Amino acid sequence: MKKSVTNDSLNPELSESIIKSIEGLAIIISLFLSFTVLLGWYFEEKQILSMIPGSATMKFNTALVFLLTGILLVIQKTKKTAILFIYYSLALIIVIIGVFTLLEYTGWSVFSIDNLFVSDKFSSKYPGRMSPATAVCSVFLGLGFITEISANNFFKKAAGFLNALIVFISILAITAYILFIPMGHKGILFQSMAIHTSLLFFLISILKILKNTKHELLPLIWGNFAGSKLIRKVLPLMILFPIIFNYLLVIAIEKELFSFDFGLIAYATIFIPLSIFYITYIALGLNKTDIEKQLVENDFRKSNRYLKQFKNGIDKAFILAITDKYGVITEVNETFCKISKYGENELIGKTHSILNSGHHDKQFFTKMWKTIRSGEIWIDEIKNKAKDGSYYWVLTAIVPFKNEDNQITEFMALRQDITDRKNAEEDRLQYLKKLEYKNKELEQFAFVASHDLQEPLRTVINFTDLLARKQKHHFDDIGIKSLDFIQEATVRMSQLIKSLLDYNRIDKNSKLSRIACNELIEEIKIDLDKKIADADATVIVNTLPTIIGYETPLRLLFQNLISNGIKFRSKEVKPYIEITARPMADGFLFMVKDNGIGISANHQEKIFEIFKRLHSKDEYDGSGIGLAHCRKIVDLHGGKIWVDSTPGSGSTFSFTIKTVYNEKKDQLHPID
Ligand code: ADP
């Protein structure tokens, strides 16, 4: 593939307008000058004809050539093909004038055109005849006009060559004038070429060269590359030095300051080292820019390599898509095709709506567009639909790409397949819902069962009471003992059912409130006053926090733990209970420490199960539901409960309470 790099510091419109200006100037000057000279011949005004007194005159035929040239340039500018015949005719006339003049110089004159229109009284040698150089230039000029409009490349190149020859000849003539080379020294070719003739030839041929090479020559001179810089720096020296030096040389020789031979040697001696020095200086400068360029290039290559590896990594690791700024897909990788089950061709040119699963609402995508259009990266999980109708989840990051003006040009979407995780999450949620439902069912069952059990139990209690009161005297000792057992068992059963009902009643239906734990425990201490006094127990309460929670359950929690601390006291020491609390990252840790009998390690888990007891009723009174209650209450507050204990040296019951239930804030009692 051909890569195009512009060598233009000069933009095409500017180069076009430069050429147009030169063209306009050439047309005006050639028409005006030729017309003036033609009038000069008519009025025989020598000053106009030669410009520089004593130098050659512009011949009538030369003026005619320029008049025709001016017209030809106008025709070229109008680009009218209808007048092509006139164009060719005029160009041919120019050629004929030149050819006939040259024929006359050879002496082989069939027809003299020298004084065809006016008679030349000013020239002593060949009156009325243009110089051989002018004649040659005219032939080249005419032929140039004919060949340069041809479609054939060979002719076009020939026209360029002819124009270059005219430039060469005209420069020679101009230089001769600049250096005051006397007529006789100019050689036969230039003897009578007028200064304005040579200037005009130069202007016209330069114009033609520029016009025909406008895409090469002008950019070459004004371009940004090393070659153009070299031309700009070297050409002025190459042109100006010989002219200025020779000019000075001619003056010096004329004033007999030194000889011509010495001048030539001086020219060579100065020009060669000066050129070498100047070119070396420029070469060093160019090398320096080249080195800098190479360093930049190396850097560029390095970052390019880095980027490629980066892209390769992304390509392998992610589901990748590039879209334009409107979201139309321009690039997808293999992984994208694999997961979406679409072919690359089916995706390119489409938007991502092809994958829409209908799972997300309109707002979801509106928000996404808002984010990425503002230049931010958007990250979220999307459920997509593959070609075969199956669904997949992707964690998506959409990255906007911006240009130098900070405008978004593209978006890059990086995705990761999270279908398995999402499915597992969904399964878990489903399972949790089921579990919750089952739990509720179970609670309901326990409640109904315990509630309904109370009724027949009450009947049994009532009738055993009646039996004990009215018929006791009919029983012997065994009968009375049995009756006592029945009564005790029924009371106990009633207690068990009551605590089972209490257990079920602990639920989240109660309202959350702010609870100052110190105040709460003071109240509990009053309630347990008799128990504490009977056991001669000490209950120390350190500074406790105010928390958000369910008041009645929390009261039960502290009460159970304090009561147990007193109940399961050691015979050796007086009961001592200490309550402390510590803040944690997301809540508080409470500790209720006693110096009681302690619990062996293998029972420390079991004691939190419902109706689990380690001692007989005779040893320690109780139903085995207290700690089950505690665990349920702590659960309700998003915490955990456990015990650290060594048998014989007391136990520490620890539990955590989460700080705030944000989602339940609205349930808070307006206490303060
Ligand atoms: P209950 O107190 O009615 O027996 P709990 O559920 O409160 O039922 O306690 C379960 C068992 O855990 C108790 O029977 C006892 O063996 C043990 N336990 C509870 N608290 C303590 C304590 N502070 N020290 C020693 N053992 C305890």
Image: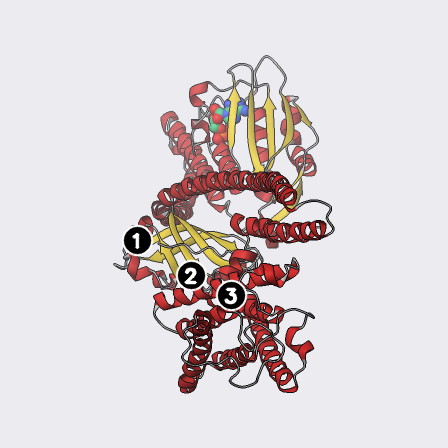
> Which residue in the rendered view is the most extreme toward the top?
572
Callout 1 secondary element: helix
The quadrant where residue 357 appears: bottom left
**Residue name at image x 66 percent, y 35 percent:** 521
Disc with the residue nearer the chain's start (3 vs 1): 3
The quadrant where residue 29 appears: bottom right
> Residue at label 2?
360
Q: Nearer the viewer, residue 318 or 117?
A: 117
Q: Nearer the viewer, residue 560 or 20?
A: 20
Q: Residues within 10 Å of mark 2 (few under 14, many from 20)?
A: few
Tag shown at residue 210: 3
Q: Are marks 2 and 1 in contact (CB under 8 Å)?
A: no
The quadrant where residue 461 appears: top left
Q: Residues within 10 Å of mark 1 (few under 14, many from 20)?
A: many
Residue 227 % position (x, y) = 52, 49
Closer to the eye: label 3 or 1: 3
Callout 3 secondary element: helix
In which quadrant of the rendered image does the N terminus lie?
bottom left
Kind of residue indicated by mark 1: Cys
Callout 2 secondary element: loop
Q: Nearer the viewer, residue 521 or 220?
A: 220
Disc with the residue nearer the chain's start (2 vs 3): 3
- In three-dimensional space, the C-alpha distance between marks 2 and 3, rounded to whole angstroms, equals 65 Å
Kind of residue indicated by mark 3: Leu
- In three-dimensional space, the C-alpha distance between marks 2 and 1, rounded to whole angstroms, equals 22 Å
Q: Are marks 3 and 1 in contact (CB under 8 Å)?
A: no
Tag shown at residue 337: 1
* Image vertical order of residue 30 relative to residue 507, above or below: below
Residue 147 % position (x, y) = 39, 72
